[in-house]
Amino acid sequence: MFYDASAFEKDLSNWNVSKDPFQVNFAKYSSFENKKNLWPKFKNKD
């Protein structure tokens, strides 16, 4: 979804995705790939 989004750093943690599985390439190669506190709370997120 945000694959290779190098300038994207919005806080998405309030998104309601509780019923959705984690997207494998959700933030791959983005500027917030390692900032998991900004990610939505997927039901199977690490």
Image (cartoon, rainbow, N blue to C red):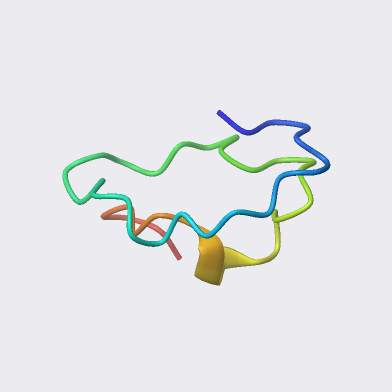
At a point 62% along the width and 33% down the height, the residue shown is: 2
Q: Quadrant of residue 27?
A: top right
Give the number of marks: 0
| Figure quadrant of the N terminus | top right
Q: Nearer the viewer, residue 1 or 22?
A: 1
Measuring from the top left, give residue 23's x and y in whole percent: 46, 37
Above or below, comparing residue 17 to residue 39 in the picture: above
Q: Would residue 41 appear left or right of 24 to someone viewing this image?
A: left
At a point 75% along the width and 35% down the height, the residue shown is: 5
Q: Would residue 20 appear left or right of 19 to someone viewing this image?
A: right
Measuring from the top left, give residue 18's x and y in whole percent: 20, 51
Residue farthest bottom in this picture: 37
Residue farthest left in this picture: 19
Above or below, comparing residue 10 to residue 28 in the picture: below
Measuring from the top left, give residue 8's x and y in whole percent: 71, 45
Measuring from the top left, give residue 13's x and y in whole percent: 41, 61
At a point 45% along the width and 65% down the height, the residue shown is: 46
Q: Would residue 38 appear left or right of 9 to someone viewing this image?
A: left
